[in-house]
């Protein structure tokens, strides 16, 4: 009897101890002992002419078309097939929407017309001239223009396209950009609109954020030029740079299985904009979110990608870099068959959940160890489901 009383007396302490030990094991910060997994640089520079959008931009009968497919015969039939399908946002495509699709087109067309506002540039120039810490002031300015994150990084030449190729007039020109640094920033894609992926509303959000990112990049470029520095903008269809790896180096996130950036607090639900420059900048360092480690067990993007364009397997060596690849023809071919830019792999990623207190606590513990990642994935599957439904 005395023994039972004694157990009863000590039961709360015992339960607390067991719970404490379990919690310590679950939250043990194994990442503390993690050796830095530094990314290799790609072993060659990428030719912009080989990017999918540049390939699709070629027009049958032009010298550029003939030149490209004489060197890349194996790509011709796939590309011709994609080109023969209706254009994105066209009437008659599966996900055409009478309001969103024309609006999306209009936003994309307007991006080509964007010019920096001279009065805004004058004000920003003064702000940077008056600042004791222009490097930090520039970050504040970029956030005030609508970005959610900004980072600075050295501009490795491996991330500058070797040749230009998106438009016929510069097709095949060597890209001689030699700026030492890059300013990389992110704009957030609206959570609710992205939940509609692959519907037209998600593509509208793509166009809106491309628009916003272009205004920011062009405004900052003009401001830096007005201070006497060199600068070039990178935004939709106007790229010198491969952006996701630069965003990783600028400390904005990690590369995921979905082959795009998983950013801190926003997951993949971001657009990336950039300015290359010789403006003096203090570089940021890459961060560890546990995201790529989580990708090893998650695979949600690959399982839910409608044309199965993402890998469910191990990372591969792609041009000297260990990463998961994308079957780009499958991805883009699917876009042309439905008339939108899909976006399921951005929207369904558990890291893309809303930026709120609950999800941010989970984001904080995910880097700790593999047990937390398994638990987080199990809860994610229970709460949000494994199969992408979106809101459509
Ligand atoms: C061409 C292109 C496409 C093509 C081809 C993609 C491809 N993998 O090549 C298609 C049409 C398929 C496509 C699809 C999409 N795209 Co896209 N695309 C681009 C574009 C214009 C060029 C990319 C490129 O040069 N690819 C050729 C080579 C480099 O590709 P790769 O070897 O597969 O390398 C990829 C990654 O591994 C990474 N990378 C390359 N080298 C290295 C090295 C290291 C060390 C690391 C860590 C990473 C890394 O960057 C490449 C990104 O595509 C970029 C803008 C830009 N300038 O970066 C946007 C861009 C990558 N796309 C973007 C997005 C969001 C998408 C989509 C989700 C569509 C959508 N709804 O917006 C899908 C996702 C497809 C996927 N899961 O891969 C965003 C990514 C934002 C983010 N969160 O990271 C970008 C940055 C546009 C932007 N300004 O925001 N895209
Ligand atoms: S959905 Fe899962 S596997 Fe895909 S990028 Fe996000 S975390 Fe990684
Ligand atoms: S955009 Fe859609 S089709 Fe392309 S990789 Fe992502 S989920 Fe797959």
Image (cartoon, grey):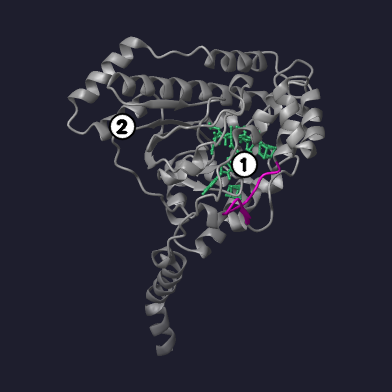
Q: Position of residue 161 (x, y in %)?
A: 54, 36
CA gap between label 2 and label 1 equals: 38 Å
Q: Position of residue 284 (x, y in %)?
A: 35, 45
Q: Is residue 58 left or right of residue 76?
A: left
What residue do we see at 55% from left, 37% from top? 162
Residue 339 appears in the picture as rendered: no
Magenta residues (range) = 316-327
The crowd level at tag 2 (other Cα within 10 Å; few <14, some 14-19, many 20+) is some
Q: Which residue is mark 2?
A: 279
Q: Nearer the viewer, residue 72 or 211?
A: 72
- Residue 348 shows which numbered tag? 1
Q: Is residue 250 left or right of residue 51?
A: left
User: Quadrant where the C terminus lies?
Assistant: top right
Instruction: Find out whether the residues at labels 2 and 1 contact each other: C-beta distance under 8 Å.
Output: no
What residue do we see at 50% from left, 26% from top? 235
Disc 1 residue lies near ligand 2 with CB under 8 A:
yes
What residue do we see at 36% from left, 19% from top? 222
Q: Given this view, does label 2 or label 1 mark the residue nearer the observer? A: 2
Magenta stretch encompasses residue 323 = yes
**Picture layout, residue 211 above or below residue 278:** above
User: Quadrant where the N terminus lies?
Assistant: bottom left
């Amino acid at each position: 009897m005395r023994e039972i009383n004694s157990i009863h007396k000590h039961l709360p302490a015992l339960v607390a101890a067991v719970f404490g030990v379990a919690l310590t094991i679950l939250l043990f910060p194994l990442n503390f002992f993690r050796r830095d997994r530094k990314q290799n640089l790609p072993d060659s520079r990428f030719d912009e002419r080989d990017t999918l959008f540049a390939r699709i931009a070629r027009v049958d009968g032009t010298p550029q078309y003939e030149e490209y497919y004489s060197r890349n015969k194996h790509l011709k039939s796939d590309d011709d097939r994609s080109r023969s399908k209706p254009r994105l946002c066209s009437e008659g495509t599966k996900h055409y929407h009478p309001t969103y699709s024309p609006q999306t087109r209009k936003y994309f067309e307007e991006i080509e017309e964007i010019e920096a506002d001279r009065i805004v540039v004058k004000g920003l120039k003064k702000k940077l001239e008056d600042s004791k810490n222009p490097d930090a002031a520039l970050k504040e300015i970029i956030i005030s223009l609508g970005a959610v994150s900004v980072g600075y990084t050295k501009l490795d030449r491996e991330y500058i396209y070797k040749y230009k190729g998106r438009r016929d007039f510069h097709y095949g020109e060597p890209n001689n950009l030699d700026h030492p640094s890059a300013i990389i920033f992110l704009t957030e894609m609206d959570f609710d609109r992205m939940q509609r992926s692959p519907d037209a509303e998600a593509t509208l959000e793509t166009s809106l954020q491309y628009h916003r990112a272009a205004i920011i990049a062009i405004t900052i470029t003009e401001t830096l030029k007005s201070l006497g520095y060199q600068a070039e903008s990178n935004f939709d269809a106007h790229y010198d740079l491969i952006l996701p790896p630069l965003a990783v180096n600028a400390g904005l996130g990690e590369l995921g299985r979905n082959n795009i950036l998983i950013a801190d607090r926003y997951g993949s639900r971001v657009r990336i904009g950039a300015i290359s420059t010789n403006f003096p900048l203090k570089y940021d360092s890459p961060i560890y979110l546990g995201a790529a480690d989580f990708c090893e067990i998650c695979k949600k993007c690959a399982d839910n990608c409608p044309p199965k364009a993402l890998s469910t397997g191990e990372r591969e060596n792609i041009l000297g870099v260990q990463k998961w690849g994308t079957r780009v023809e499958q991805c883009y071919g699917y876009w042309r068959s439905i008339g939108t830019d899909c976006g399921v792999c951005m929207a369904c990623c558990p890291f893309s959940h809303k930026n709120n207190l609950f999800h941010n606590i989970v984001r904080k513990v995910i880097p700790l160890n593999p047990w937390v990642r398994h638990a987080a994935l199990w809860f994610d599957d229970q709460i949000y489901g494994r199969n992408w439904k979106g809101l459509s």
